[in-house]
């Protein structure tokens, strides 16, 4: 079993190295770098990220429930009370259902610096009240950093695809 895993990892590494294309990376270096934040976006990811990429941007970070903020901290495995350490780790995620939520606003500038972000796109599902309420504070935080902000409220349908394309294209164009 261990050998199968190692073989799979070796094959994955070979595949990644085989697909490495320096000229593609150089071209992407000229694109506007976007941080996508908001709801856990599942199927909405296809709709928004593809439109951003078709508009000439590149998504460099996902700061949402299923993105970077869920994985950037480790549990303190050396803590005397491991259950408390696990609980503290989960309470520090910065989810908008935890109110007040200073962790998210503190993480954002660090991500902007670490990923050299040019603009922030917040995706809020129409049924997600918690993120909708927090959107105002996030927009203010992004604008205070001097970055462009685009707030998108959407759902899982494709009915708003044309409207989103227009808004996203304009957002990326304004960053040039």
Image: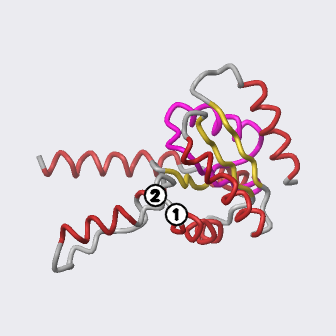
Q: What residue did someone put label 1 on?
A: 101
Foreground of the two, 21 or 130: 130
Q: Which residue bears the numbered disc 2?
A: 98
Point out which mark residue 137 bears: none
What's drawn in magenta, residue-wise?
30-59
- Provide residue 156's location: percent of width, then percent of height: 57, 26
Using the numbered discs, state the Cα–Cα distance from disc 1 to disc 2 in whole angstroms: 6 Å
Give coordinates of residue 174: x percent, y percent. Answer: 88, 50
Q: Nearer the viewer, residue 36 or 176?
A: 36
> Magenta stretch: residue 58 in it?
yes
Image point 67% across, 37% down: which residue?
Answer: 153
* Residue 50 falls in image quadrant: top right
> Against 84, is 120 above or below?
above
Image quadrant occupied by the C terminus: bottom right
User: Residue at left 33%, top 46%?
Assistant: 11
Q: Horizontal placement of 109 versus 107: left or right?
A: right
> Is residue 115 positioned above or below 18 on the image?
below
Secondary structure found at label 1? loop
Q: Is residue 53 left or right of residue 163?
A: left
Q: Is residue 117 left or right of residue 165?
A: left
User: Looking at the image, how many numbered discs can be counted on the residues?
Assistant: 2
Disc 1 vs disc 2: Cβ atoms closer than 8 Å? yes
Q: Residues within 10 Å of mark 2 (few under 14, many from 20)?
A: few
The residue depicted at 66 percent of the width and 48 percent of the height is 122
Q: How is the image coloured?
A: secondary structure
- The local secondary structure at tag 2 comes to loop
Residue 55 place in picture, x, y as percent: 77, 39
């Amino acid at each position: 079993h261990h050998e199968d895993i190692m073989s799979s990892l070796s094959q994955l590494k070979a595949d990644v190295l085989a697909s490495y294309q320096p000229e593609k990376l150089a071209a992407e270096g000229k694109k506007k770098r976007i941080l996508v934040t908001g709801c856990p976006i599942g199927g909405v990811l296809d709709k928004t990220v593809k439109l951003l990429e078709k508009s000439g941007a590149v998504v460099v970070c996902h700061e949402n429930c299923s993105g970077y903020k869920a994985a950037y901290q480790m549990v303190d495995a050396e803590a005397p009370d491991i259950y408390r350490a696990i609980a503290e780790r989960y309470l520090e995620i910065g989810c908008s259902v935890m109110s007040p939520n200073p962790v998210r606003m503190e993480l954002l500038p660090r991500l902007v610096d670490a990923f050299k972000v040019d603009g922030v796109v917040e995706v809020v599902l129409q049924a997600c009240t918690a993120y909708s309420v927090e959107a105002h504070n996030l927009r203010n935080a992004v604008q205070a950093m001097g970055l462009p902000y685009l707030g998108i409220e959407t759902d899982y349908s494709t009915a708003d695809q044309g409207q989103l394309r227009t808004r996203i294209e304009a957002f990326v164009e304004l960053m040039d």
